[in-house]
Amino acid sequence: MKRNSFILIFLFISFFSHINVNALSAQTFTRITTGSIATDAGLSKAATWSDYNNDGNVDLFVPNTIFEDNFLYLNNGDGSFTKILSSTIVNDGGNAQTANSETATWGDFDNDGDLDVFISYNGPNNQLHRNNGDGTFTKITSGSIVNDGGGSRATASGDYNNDGFLDVFVANRFGENNFLYKNNGDGSFTKIISGPVVNDGGDSQGCAWADYDNDGFLDLLVTNASDNFLYNNNGDGTFTKITTSPILNYFGPGGSWGDYNNDGFLDLFITNSQQNEPNALFKNNGDGTFTRITEGSIVNDLGISRGSAWGDHDNDGDLDLVVANGVLVASENNFLYSNNGDGTFTKILSGPVVNDGGLSLSVGWADYDNDGDLDLFVGNTSEVNFLYKNNGNQNNWLNLKLIGTSSNTAAIGAKVRVKALIDGTETWQMREISGQTGRGGQNSLNAEFGLRDASVIDAIKVEWPSGIVQNLVNIPVNQFLTITEEKVACDPFDCPDAAVFPTNETGVLGERITGLTGEVVYIDIRLKENPNKIDAFGFTVQVEPTHLAFIEFLPGELTSGFKFLNAQESSAGSGEIICGGANPDPIPPASSGSLFRLGFRVIGGSGDSSIVTITSLTDDVAGFSACCNIVKFRGCKNDGDVDSNGVLTPADALCAFKIFLNHQILPAECGTSGFDCELTAADPNCDGQVTPGDALKIFKGYFNQQQPQHCFARSKVAYQLYQISLNQATIVSRKNNQDTDLVKVSFFIDNPEGIEAFGLSLSYPKDKLEFVVVEATELTGNWLQLGGSSEIPGEIIVGGFNTEPLMGGASGELFQVIFKSRDRSLSTIDFEITELVDDLKDALIESTSLELVAVPNQFSLYQNYPNPFNPETSISFDIPTMDKQKIQTTISIFNVSGQLVRILMKEAKTPGSYQIKWDGRDKRGLKVPSGLYLYSIRADKFEITKKMLLLK
């Protein structure tokens, strides 16, 4: 089982180095007051940065509402901007049908190398504008993406299905369903109409894509005027709505994702526009859950906040935060919080950014003057907007531009991780390229890193949405660097008929296929079509050896009868597989099918990938086109969420119990992922097996409203030493309409105190007995689950669990196992109890060899003996097997007048034959006179009376 390792890095900074750090981090801003960018006033809802003309200088687009033209400012490269007055993305203010823009998201939707823009409108249709590459735009007029009118408040671009093309999400108000448009890759979009993302309604205010669980797929946050929505990307084009998270129990205009504590996971800040309500910061725990931070001014300052954005404004190696405050009728100062590097923040109190007031709605960071530090734009309503130039400091920095090839060219969704020695400590930082920040903001699409005193960048790791990972080392600081996604030897999308990566029995052609960590994935090397016969061939398959380990090869459809066929690794661990074959009977021309099936064990972790390439084609396949494919890997979590719906439910517990009863094999009704991740999820104590105790922990998690989390149930440190035995086996005689006997075996336990979950394997002679059912007893009659199965004849898996443990007491019957007898001459049966788990893990096993005792099949009361009698007589009776475990039975003596003389017995009896004596005395202990007496039995609905004679 894969285990996660965590390295704890303890930071110690001396007093003197702390003084030095402050000196390096001194930071001021200057508000720009000249130029149209600083003097234009409007109802500006958004602040979006983008280098739309690809000149290396970031430009600014500001959507305005209420019949005003939008603002577009072209960066001149000298610190000034030119206002663009004529453009399709600008001139909508004069038309009441097209004005009222809210927010915008920039991205290269057609992958032609320049940034396009999608604009959301509150009322009119939304707009998509294609960049013509010459500084102008063409408005797209066809397709649902530009014809679905609504109260659209926010939008964000992201490649949620990792097909290399940017998709668009739109957040709508007034209870309308939100919109999701999948990019078809040909300039058109398909509106998604199924799934929770587009059917949850809500009064949505903001949205933001982010891969918060680091599985390589963008998840989605939607902020609402009521509870928020969080959707986890399943990696197959669908989403699971998260139903338990502190993020959901909060509402606000927008959220900003950023790794403020440098642990490699995106944290979340959400603004609150309610008066006298604080904003919220949620720390990512790294297991798919979040913890709300409750201390510090960053989460306790009161303001009517809307926009927010993360950015390392002082280049000290950690993300700071700016928050836009204000309403239409009241000006408020904005907030700026400086990250202290220890998980806390200091509120900045001086400087224009936090003292200029303003009716601010949106903010965005970008290095508009290319001097290595982040500048700030603030969008205001009914007044001029604010542009602040960062005056910089002595800290070092790095500014990265990413260009995708297999991924979307804007690289939205890519993660950049940078390692450097900062203040003597090896520090990793992470940025994810995003199409939205906060309410109405979009930072520059560049990844900007502060490096403080680092003199060199030790490593840069780029994780592209395609699954390709690029690594650079020993990079100089203080530079603008462009990284283009590596073009592999052959692009999987250039040749979609290349390789088949089967899952189960069916192959999927030309797609990135996900392999489960620790399992085996098979790769079919296929021949598309050959012009000539093939009687000898050879080629080399290369995989990433740290992610895929070669284990075997199998013949393909076209080579199953080949005399010679072989595939072997050139050297152990190289990942280079030499494949070849020869046969007197050639493969005929125009054939298609598989030549080889290669088996690999996935050793990569979740989010890793391996490109598979075919090279060195020889003999009859020499000169053929060779293509490649990508295998991506996913990990499974021991989190109890068997059905992967984001919450713990009784159904999860039931599936875990079924897995136990099914010999650790996933039942069909519980399998949804195709990778048996359900088996891992059903083992929340991470001990490698699914038991009733796991099912109980899952059910308790549901009952306590616990979130799914990895390894949340720990095994007991020690188990009570119980003593168990099989000490009763009874034969239920055949009735007239039965042709077999039933055998009941009782499972007894000494003092059962504390038992709430157990499991075991019971072996029985399959030639003599046939399993029927496991039945509860008085001890376990009200348990949540108790059952057994015998998928393998001769072995029964028995188990059960309950939220309330058993109380202490004398020995008791825990359960019964019912068999059909195959041999009516049975007198003894040998059983074996093994594989005890959960509360019976260390139990002592006593008798397992049982003599059979017959059990009546009907009630009977026999004539007393002797009769007449003096001084005592015996009364015999039978209690048959019924639905009840025990039957209340009363034996009474009456005189001939019907008066009660004595109750000989009144107790619950199990099925069997019994005898009781009467000594001729009444209930007071006095001897009764000679005469005729009546004795009767009453048991369940059975009642019968007989006569007896006492003679003295």
Image (cartoon, helix red, strand yellow):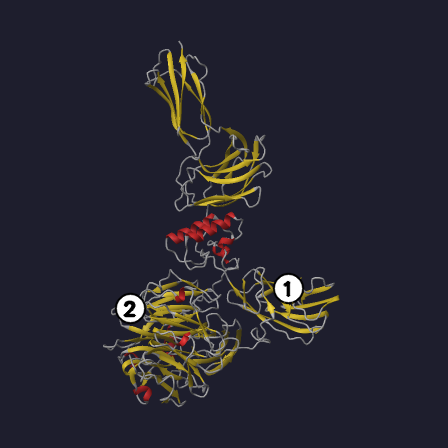
Q: Quadrant of residue 530?
A: bottom right
Q: Is residue 363 visible?
A: yes
Question: Which residue is at a point 58% across and 70% down the rendered structure image?
Answer: 629
Badge 2 crowding class, 10 Å Cα cut-off, few under 14, some 14 to 19, many 20 or more, is many
Residue 822 vertical placement versus 617 (above, below): above
The residue identified by callout 2 is 278
Q: Point out the residue furthest to the top here.
A: 952
Q: Position of residue 180 (x, y in %)?
A: 41, 70
Residue contact at pointers 1 and 2, CB within 8 angstroms? no
Badge 1 marks a residue whose secondary structure is strand
The reply to whether residue 32 is in sight is no
Nearer to me, 891 or 570: 891
Residue bearing the label numbered 1: 597
Q: Amino acid at mark 1?
A: Arg
* Amino acid on which disc 2 is placed: Pro
Mark earlier in primary sequence (1, 2): 2
User: In the shown orientation, is residue 825 left or right of residue 344?
Assistant: right
- As drawn, the residue found furthest toward the left would be 329
Pick the front one: 440 or 573: 440
Residue 541 x/y as whole percent:
64, 70
The crowd level at tag 1 (other Cα within 10 Å; few <14, some 14-19, many 20+) is many
> Which quadrant would the C terminus be assigned to in this image?
top left
Residue lying at 65% horizontally and 62% vertically, measured from the top left: 553
